Amino acid sequence: MLKAREAVPSSRHGETPLYLGATAGMRLLNIENASASDAVFQAVEAALHSSPFSFRGARILSGQEEGAFGWVTVNYLDDRLTQGQETTGALDLGGASTQISFVSARFDGTESPDNLMNFRLYGNDYNLYTHSYLCYGKDQALRKMLALQTASGPTSLSDPCFHPGYIRTRDYSELYASPCVARSKPQASPRNFTLKGTGDFDSCRTAVKKIFDFSKCNFSRCSFNGVFQPELQGSFGAFSAYYFVLDFLNLTDTAAPMETIKDKLREYCATPWADMQRQHPSTKVKYLAEYCFSGTYILTLLTEGYNFTADTFKDITIIRKIKGSDAGWTLGYMLNLTNMVPAEAPDAPPLPHAGYVSVMVLTGLLLGVLLLFITYTLSKTQCSNPHKIV
Ligand SMILES: Nc1ncnc2c1ncn2[C@@H]1O[C@H](COP(=O)(O)OP(=O)(O)OP(=O)(O)O)[C@@H](O)[C@H]1O
């Protein structure tokens, strides 16, 4: 808010619209404890009402909206919508949910209407495929994996997704305090367990893969958990936690061979925890401890979950910003609420600007010549009939 006050001239504060959108973290809180979620909204709304901006409401976005607005942002910033070009798909990874959105020539919503978002933008129609996976953001995905590993209520857990030498005591009640895992809490578990890292990428992949269900699909094709997904098409931009994690791991080059990416992760996960802390003293410890899991999760989600292959992986660009603006759902949300992306292309002028200038100059010249001619004719008439005036 302080940044916004500085960025917007104070004379314009009152006319600047302010909206608040909440995503999967709040969706989960709403499921878990609706009155707590309401209380958060009341407090936030009170604070925003007292800001100098024109506050126009706070609400929780649906997963579909989150995915679709991320897609609008990426394609708006790339100027693909005004030009009616082939669009870029959007891959968003948050803490609580993850979204995939893209236009596919093979998807018109018939097979799975829930995944369809129709848009008419700048005179072009788009059938957007979008799906949001609640509980598959990187923080909730880690909970899901740990829940599977602690289903029998052990006091100690050797975990391949954490560095060798990493030790942390984890509280069972805290780990299972999320609707994503609450139902699988072991009946008779001790108060806590000791998590010990073993740093083994291949075993980590095996553990991560277990949080995806590939056993059922009632459609012609699925990603995971029985969710319909048409064949991937075109290029994709991956942002948010995809960027934070892959940038830290130096793995943003998606054109690198898949084996090279795996080798780098193998080496990274196997690095002793003490070395990691020494090499990255200013990195937040929670992030540092979880990059091995997060990197492995991202690779598994993209390849096994969404079906990117060794060949199509290079179609993904890992992005943070486009032309100086953050890639993410927020800009798309604002553009939508302020009607800044019109359904129809603005009327094209019949002539380009240079054409108008030429017509104006020619008309001016003609009028000038006409005026001169009239003046000349009049003065001649007056000279040849001097007596008629009297
Ligand atoms: N530098 C970083 N390194 C690693 N993780 C990061 C870094 N910065 C932020 N994160 C994490 O990345 C995740 C994505 O954050 P973001 O704010 O984009 O999504 P979110 O609001 O959690 O989304 P959603 O509610 O839809 O799941 C969060 O879990 C956040 O803690």
Image (spheres, helix red, strand yellow):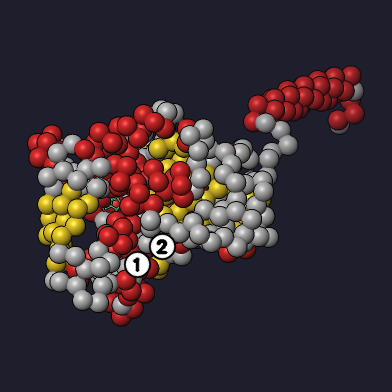
Give the labeled residue for mark 2: 134
Kind of residue at disc 2: Leu
Q: Position of residue 92 (x, y in %)?
A: 42, 49
Q: Position of residue 199 (x, y in %)?
A: 22, 43
Q: Report the front residue among 375 and 271.
A: 271
Tell which residue pokes out farthest to the bottom in this image. Answer: 35
| Residue 146 figure quarter | bottom left
In the shown orientation, is residue 209 left or right of residue 337? left
On screen, 163 above or below 374? below
Q: Is residue 6 visible?
A: no
Q: Position of residue 142 (x, y in %)?
A: 29, 56
Q: Residues within 10 Å of mark 2 (few under 14, many from 20)?
A: many
Q: Residue at x 44, y 45 (%)?
A: 302
Q: Which mark is residue 180?
A: 1
Q: Earlier in the sequence, mark 1 or mark 2?
A: 2
Q: Is residue 144 visible?
A: yes
Kind of residue at disc 1: Cys
In the shown orientation, is residue 61 left or right of residue 146? right
Q: Residues within 10 Å of mark 1 (few under 14, many from 20)?
A: some
**Residues at marks 1 and 2, CA–CA distance in whole angstroms:** 8 Å
Q: Position of residue 327 (x, y in %)?
A: 40, 44
SS assignment at label 1? loop
Q: Report the front residue among 373 and 49.
A: 49
Labels 1 and 2 touching (C-beta < 8 A):
yes
Q: Residue at x 52, y 35 (%)?
A: 312
